[in-house]
Amino acid sequence: MNNQFELTNSQLLDIANNLRLKIETGLQEDGTEIKCLPTYIHPNKDGIKGEATVFDLGGTNFRAAIVSVGEEPKIVGLAEKDITEMKTEGFTKEDLYNSQAEIINKLDLKENSPIGYCFSYPATSLTDGDAELITWTKGVNIDGMVGEPVGKTLVEFLNENTPVKFGNIAVVNDTITSLFAGLLNPGYDSYIGLIVGTGTNMATFFPSEYIPKLAGLKGWSGETPVNLESGNFNPPHLTVFDTIVDDNSNNTGFQRFEKAISGMYLGRVFRAAFPLEHLDVDLDAADLSRMMNNPESYKPEYSEVAFQIYERSAKLVAASITGLVLNLHSANPAVKTIQVLAEGSLFWSKVKTGNTSYVELVNACLKELLSELGMGDKTVQISRIDNANLIGAAMAVLS
């Protein structure tokens, strides 16, 4: 069967170079396709030690934990709650804070504990380590919070309404927490945080002098963590099926890269490839995995095309890492060893078709692309850490 999702190395290098240029543009000015949002927290690469309270607010879940970081990270306490109610109409800021306080009060907290807050919504980082909500996503729309500091207002509420007083707070994106969690593996020249699950994104540390849009910021130097928001990348060499998925989405023209590679959209790409078949409208990456892992239960072309889409996703991720490696090389040609801390169920999946795993596909393609660019001397190590969100948020506030 003809593979309409095949990408040659030449096309993948086009994609890598296109991303490299768009990252450079995003580092120069705000409001570009690749946003390159700076986070004003200096990474401590020499070993972070200490204990912090950590909050993690996702689309439907809120977690609070006490995390100690040192020789071996430990999650000493963990409490969580499904707060899908935050998506209901009329849910207020006070309702959210009360829900969060209810969970936080279950922990045995010390006075003046620093807080690392993994906040998985678009936010602009502030120079004091806090962040300002840009917009709600994921079906949430709570009045009176857009344009406000996320951390400061929560800490004020908690200090008035809980038994203990809290210290400083660092509010970080979930990709930034993956980036910081990677510092648990010291000794690399450079670090990348990568998410490939329901959605996708990358983050890295750049020397501040390599970020022209920070030039006017007084008293800020050293390395800056940058959240690329790379899911919004619009790469060359997408297919007509990707255009169909985009046209039928609720954010046409945006997140084109995410729509080609992430778990939320792979099922939609598959449906677009079989327009005359009556396929489930909620088809997702897990369904494609079932087709690849149980080929005898499906039409042969289903498991074959499912694998083509899965393989293309991995190769696109390899191209995006390659693009970012080119930026890291431009910032510092001496960079030789790079660690990628990868999160997401899709990234760490395995399939029977092709007898492979996603990470193996990424690694093989990445090696070829770097070799073709004459960068075979760069070593990219892809790693994983359990509870990277919690540990990375603690490391951010303790840096």
Image: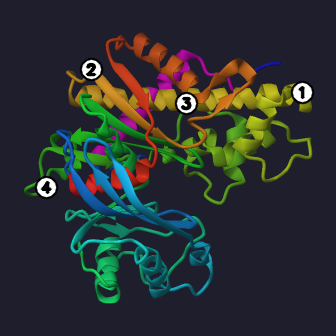
Task: Identify the mark nearer the N-term, 1 or 3.
Answer: 1
Identity, as a three-letter code, of the amino acid under mark 1: Glu
Q: Is residue 108 above or below residue 392?
A: below
Residue beneath disc 3? 316
Using the image, tell me which numbered label, if any, was put on residue 51. none
Q: What residue occupies the far left of the structure in this picture? A: 219
Residue ID at (31%, 31%): 327
Residue beneath disc 2? 336
Residue 216: x percent and y percent?
A: 13, 55
Q: In the figure, residue 185 lies in which quadrant?
A: top left
What coloring was used for the rendering? rainbow
Q: How many numbered circles does the render carry?
A: 4
Which label lies toward us, 4 or 2?
2
Quadrant for the N terminus in the image: top right
Q: Is residue 144 above or below residue 303?
A: below
Q: In this rendering, does residue 237 appear at all?
A: no
Which label lies toward us, 1 or 4?
1
Q: Identify which residue, 303 or 238, lies in the foreground.
A: 303
Q: In the figure, residue 295 lies in which quadrant?
A: top right
Q: CA distance from mark 3 to mark 4?
A: 35 Å
Residue beneath disc 4? 216
Q: CA distance from mark 1 to mark 4?
A: 61 Å
Residue beneath disc 1? 296
Residue ID at (69%, 31%): 309
